[in-house]
Image (spheres, rainbow, N blue to C red):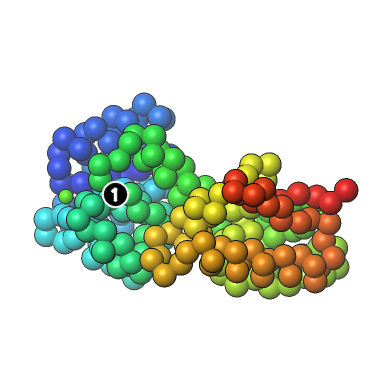
Amino acid sequence: MRVLIVEDEERLALTLASLLKRSGYTTTIAGDGLGGLKLAGEGTFDAMILDVMLPGMNGFDVLRQMRADGNDTPVLLLTARSELADRVQGLNAGADYYLTKPFENEELLACLRTILRRSNASVSDVLQFGDLTLTPSISSLACKDRSVSLSARELQLMELLIQNSGHLLSKDTILSKVWGYDSDAGPNSVEAYLSFLRKKLNLLSSNVRICVTRNLGYKLEVKS
Ligand code: CA
């Protein structure tokens, strides 16, 4: 896996590179926005870690230009805590994930795995659980000969539940993975979308249900 690091603080860039190397990634460092954009354009990276405050061209503009060029490399944006208000701007610009400085190494590696998994999931054809088949490319959830289409949020939520089947997902986890840091969403949004999905599972007469363990979280189960 090749990761492009665009970060102007040299010490942080080198620390990131050595952390990623120890975890088996190959890294390339760019020290400014334009250089990062140029390297990203070569299209040989599996993921990109992009600082927001960069000399020349800032991270948001790099990202916007990449997406405008049709480059869908997953991007993890790094931002200082004082720039929290810019999160929505970053997500709108096409970021896959946000990490606020300072961060823990483990947190960064986990985010990186998440965005890599997401980008792989979007190219793979189908996900299965119980009698359900989820086809992300056409937003379709099917059970035997029935199928329903899912909204973008419902699709992300269903993907997350299937990919984590067997584990309880807390409301906070669901919120951050599906809604990112969209400030308008809250626990009620999670409940609303879980209830939309439950209705669709009923429509499909699926043997899969979304179980809730009070105060702990949600997971998929096959009805026996
Ligand atoms: Ca910086």
Q: Residue furthest right?
A: 224
Q: Is residue 171 left or right of residue 180?
A: right
Q: Nearer the viewer, residue 47 or 128?
A: 128
Q: Amino acid at mark 1?
A: Thr
**Which quadrant would the N terminus be assigned to in this image?**
top left
Work out whether residue 217 can be spotted: yes
Q: Secondary structure at mark 1?
A: strand
Say which quarter of the image contains residue 133. Answer: bottom right
Q: Is mark 1 within 8 Å of ligand 1?
A: no
Q: Nearer the viewer, residue 93 or 197?
A: 197
Q: Nearer the viewer, residue 2 or 114?
A: 114
Residue at figure coordinates x 15%, y 46% from the top left: 8
Residue at figure coordinates x 69%, y 60% from the top left: 134
Q: Position of residue 168 (x, y in %)?
A: 62, 44
Say which quarter of the image contains residue 193. Answer: bottom right
Q: Position of residue 88 (x, y in %)?
A: 33, 66
Mark 1, residue position: 100
Q: Position of residue 174 (x, y in %)?
A: 53, 55
Q: Nearer the viewer, residue 126 or 34?
A: 126
Say which quarter of the image contains residue 203. Answer: bottom right
Residue at figure coordinates x 56%, y 63% from the top left: 190
Residue at figure coordinates x 74%, y 70% from the top left: 199
Q: Residue furthest left?
A: 55
* Crowding at mark 1 (Cα within 10 Å: few <14, some 14-19, many 20+): some
For residue 198, above or below residue 174:
below
Q: Is residue 85 left or right of residue 94?
A: left
Work out whether residue 123 can be spotted: no
Q: Position of residue 35 (x, y in %)?
A: 19, 53
Q: Residue furthest top?
A: 22
Q: Is residue 41 left or right of residue 190?
A: left
Q: How many marks?
A: 1
